[in-house]
Image (cartoon, grey):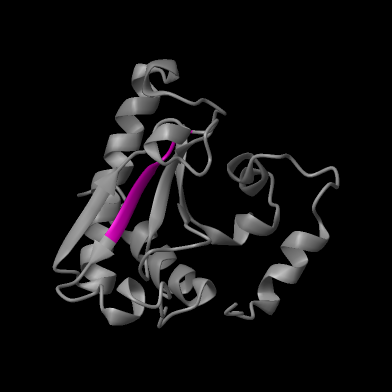
């Protein structure tokens, strides 16, 4: 069996079962450990780095309300989530200069949702050749940037790009 050491997860697993909200997105809004991953705040939704990214810069646009489906979202929530997706596209383009982006949702466990009860939109920067033998054969992904570095790069760009245009 291959072992990959991840000492940064000790804080997460040692808190399992305490009084923090079960939903990582709800906990992030309350300033929990995942709160440090929030890179932009909107009125009805926010943008947060994925704790287990597919690529550097992988974020999710999340409604503040704990809802599972698009049908449960209000028109204002859906509109803001789409506006934040477009803002994310611009921020990713500036910060990471990707050759493409994956934008998508997994609604329900059968569709691949890891967090089933709190819907979210994934935005993943992509580059030609970003899937290599390591990922395909070794089932290992090498991440060149840690989450704190990604947050430090993204926050000021989101802040600047979200300012009202003159």
- Looking at the rendering, the stretch of residues picked out in magenta corresponds to 119-124
Judge whether 26 appears above or below 95 on screen.
Answer: above
**Residue 39 position within the rendered picture, expressed as x and y whole percent measured from the top left:** 47, 58
Most foreground residue, 162 or 114:
114
Q: Residue at x 67, y 45 (%)?
A: 27
Q: Is residue 154 rendered to the left or right of residue 15?
A: left
Q: Quadrant of the N terminus?
A: bottom right
Q: Main secondary structure of the magenta part?
A: strand
Q: Is residue 27 rendered to the left or right of residue 127?
A: right
Q: Residue at x 50, y 44 (%)?
A: 114
Most foreground residue, 112 or 25:
112
Judge whether 59 appears above or below 138 on screen.
Answer: above
Magenta stretch encompasses residue 123 = yes
Q: Is residue 29 rendered to the left or right of residue 72?
A: right
Q: Quadrant of residue 12?
A: bottom right
Most foreground residue, 165 or 142:
142
**Residue 112 position within the rendered picture, expressed as x and y whole percent measured from the top left:** 41, 41
């Amino acid at each position: 069996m291959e072992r990959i050491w991840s000492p940064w997860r000790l804080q997460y697993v040692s808190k399992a079962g305490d009084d923090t909200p079960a939903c990582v997105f709800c906990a992030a809004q309350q300033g929990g450990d995942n709160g440090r991953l929030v890179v932009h705040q909107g009125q009805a939704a926010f943008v947060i780095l994925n704790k287990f990214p597919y690529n550097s810069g992988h974020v999710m646009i999340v409604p503040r309300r704990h809802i599972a489906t698009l049908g449960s979202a209000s028109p204002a929530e859906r509109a803001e989530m789409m506006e934040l997706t477009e803002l994310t596209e611009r921020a990713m383009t500036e910060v990471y200069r990707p050759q493409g982006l994956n934008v998508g949702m997994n609604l329900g466990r059968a569709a691949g949702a890891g967090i089933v009860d709190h819907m979210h939109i994934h935005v993943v920067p992509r580059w030609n050749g970003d899937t290599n033998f390591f990922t395909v054969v070794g089932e290992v992904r090498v991440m060149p940037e840690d989450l704190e570095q990604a947050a430090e790069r993204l926050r000021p760009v989101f802040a600047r790009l979200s300012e009202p245009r003159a």
